[in-house]
Image (spheres, grey):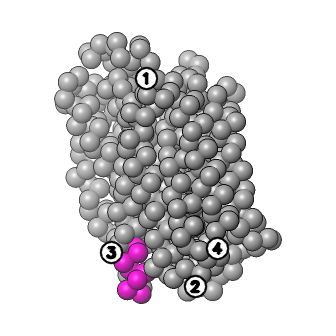
């Protein structure tokens, strides 16, 4: 049961909301997974060099950076459920745009819209996830991000099949967009209609993170940079560096998404056992080993396991960054919004940085940078100490209490 004030049934509604928000994460991931498997097709169709492709792939970063801070106002005005439904619907429809672009300038415009809808939907659904986690009193964010990876994995399977059958990506992505749009509508009905109090002021257009969260943002930056680089460039890397076929190149993303999904779905239990700092250091070590394999690879047999290890290593870092940010200062929502902007912008600029560096040197050198950032995770893990465990205060919280609604600050 929900009310316009955002009060939830203390026993049943949070559990139903958890299932709904998990499925929303899955749909969001499916859009990403569908797109990245067809990047080589788009590159070939428009005859783009690595540098020109990198230029196009910076457009989502710009669109997301401009639009992401506005998501808080959308949530404030329309409520959490309507905001997520509307923004995830736009994100699904945006999937069809890049393959339709007839030229590089048109591709840049399409990816600008694609990034703007991605970022706004991301902030809105993560805000819901944080609030539902608060009300449940236990960690769920790693599992939610695992559902995102699972959605990407499932969609990438269809992308691999489409690449193998040499299907036109324009048709495939348009049909996928409509299917995901149809799935998102009933899923969103189970979300809580969380709203800010009527007397609350509208949030600022851009929520700057407090200074104490900057290091946390940098940890997330390193992890999401590796994620974005692997998602968008793994297929091109296997094709150009290791000589893999189009089908095998598309499968590289599947290996990466599979390990990310499994690691994140198991992540909440692992974090409780190891603690945030040890989990981050171990993850950084695994991701570094994966990066070394990718850089040294001269065949798909080495590169694909390398991308898989990168996925394992960075899987839980972003959920831990959110948890740590949420324990900073008197306005945790502001820190969460700021860290989210930094980390997701990192993932969106990573493909452009990789492409630019590859144009100047090589893709092998580009993934040397990814390996260095993975190593930095081991050195900076202490910044996530605030995410150690799920606070006793949360566990002791009465189920009838009504925590401050963080959506209003986003």
- Quadrant containing the N terminus in the rendered view: top left
Residue occupied by mark 1: 390
Which tag is nearer the camera, tag 2 or tag 3? 2
Compared with residue 203, is residue 168 higher up or lower down, i.e. above or below?
below
Q: Secondary structure at mark 4?
A: loop
Q: Secondary structure at mark 1?
A: loop
Q: Earlier in the sequence, mark 4 or mark 2?
A: 2
Write the start and end of the magenta stretch as one range. Answer: 159-167
Give the Cα separation between the discs numbered 1 and 4. 43 Å
Q: Name which residue lies at 54% across and 47% down.
A: 313
Which tag is nearer the camera, tag 1 or tag 3? 1
Q: Which mark is on residue 298?
A: 4
Q: Secondary structure at mark 3?
A: helix
Residue occupied by mark 3: 175
* Disc 2 crowd, CA 10 A, few/some/many (<14, 14-19, 20+): few
Q: Earlier in the sequence, mark 1 or mark 4?
A: 4
Which tag is nearer the camera, tag 4 or tag 2? 4
Give the Cα separation between the discs numbered 4 and 3. 36 Å
Residue 242 in percent (x, y) is at 61, 76
Residue 350 in percent (x, y) is at 65, 58
Which tag is nearer the camera, tag 1 or tag 4? 4
Compared with residue 164, is residue 329 higher up or lower down, i.e. above or below?
above
| Residue ranking furthest to the right | 360
Magenta-span inclusion, residue 166:
yes
Give the Cα separation between the discs numbered 4 and 2. 23 Å
* Disc 3 crowd, CA 10 A, few/some/many (<14, 14-19, 20+): some
Q: Earlier in the sequence, mark 2 or mark 3?
A: 2
Residue 234, by quadrant, is bottom right
Which tag is nearer the camera, tag 2 or tag 1? 1
Residue 120 vs residue 391, the one in the foreground: 391
Q: Name which residue lies at 62% across and 52% down.
A: 289
Magenta-span inclusion, residue 175:
no
């Amino acid at each position: 049961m929900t009310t316009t004030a955002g009060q939830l049934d203390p026993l049943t509604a949070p559990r139903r909301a958890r299932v709904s928000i998990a499925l929303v994460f899955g749909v969001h991931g499916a859009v990403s997974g569908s797109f990245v498997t067809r990047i080589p097709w788009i590159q070939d169709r428009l005859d783009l060099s690595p540098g020109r492709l990198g230029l196009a792939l910076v457009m989502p970063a710009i669109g997301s950076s401009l639009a992401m801070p506005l998501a808080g106002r959308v949530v404030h005005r329309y409520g959490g459920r309507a905001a997520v439904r509307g923004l995830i619907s736009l994100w699904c429809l945006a999937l069809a745009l890049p393959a339709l672009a007839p030229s590089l300038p048109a591709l840049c415009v399409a990816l600008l819209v694609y990034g703007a809808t991605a970022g706004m939907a991301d902030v809105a659904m993560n805000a819901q996830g944080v609030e539902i986690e608060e009300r449940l009193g236990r960690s769920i964010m790693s599992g939610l991000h695992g559902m995102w990876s699972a959605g990407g994995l499932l969609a990438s399977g269809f992308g691999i099949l489409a690449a193998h059958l040499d299907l036109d990506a324009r048709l495939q992505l348009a049909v996928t967009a409509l299917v995901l749009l149809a799935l998102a509508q009933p899923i969103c009905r189970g979300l809580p209609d969380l709203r800010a109090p009527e007397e609350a002021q509208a949030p600022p257009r851009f929520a700057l993170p407090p200074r104490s969260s900057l290091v946390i943002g940098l940890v997330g930056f390193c992890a999401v940079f590796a994620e974005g680089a692997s998602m968008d460039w793994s297929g091109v890397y296997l094709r150009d560096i290791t000589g893999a076929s189009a089908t095998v190149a598309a499968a590289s993303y599947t290996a990466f998404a599979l390990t990310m999904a499994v690691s994140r779905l198991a992540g909440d239990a692992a974090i409780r056992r190891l603690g945030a700092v040890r989990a981050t250091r171990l993850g950084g070590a695994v991701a570094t080993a994966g990066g070394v394999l990718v850089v040294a690879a001269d065949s798909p047999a080495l590169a694909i396991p390398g991308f898989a290890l990168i996925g394992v290593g960075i899987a839980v870092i972003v959920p831990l960054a959110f948890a740590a940010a949420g324990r900073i200062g008197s306005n945790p929502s502001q820190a969460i919004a700021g860290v989210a902007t930094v980390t997701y912008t990192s993932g969106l600029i990573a493909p452009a940085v990789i492409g630019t560096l590859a144009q100047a040197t090589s893709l092998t050198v580009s993934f040397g940078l990814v390996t260095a950032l993975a190593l930095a995770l081991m050195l900076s893990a202490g910044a996530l100490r605030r995410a150690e465990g799920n606070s006793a205060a949360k566990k002791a919280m009465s189920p009838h209490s009504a925590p401050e609604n963080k959506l209003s600050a986003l």
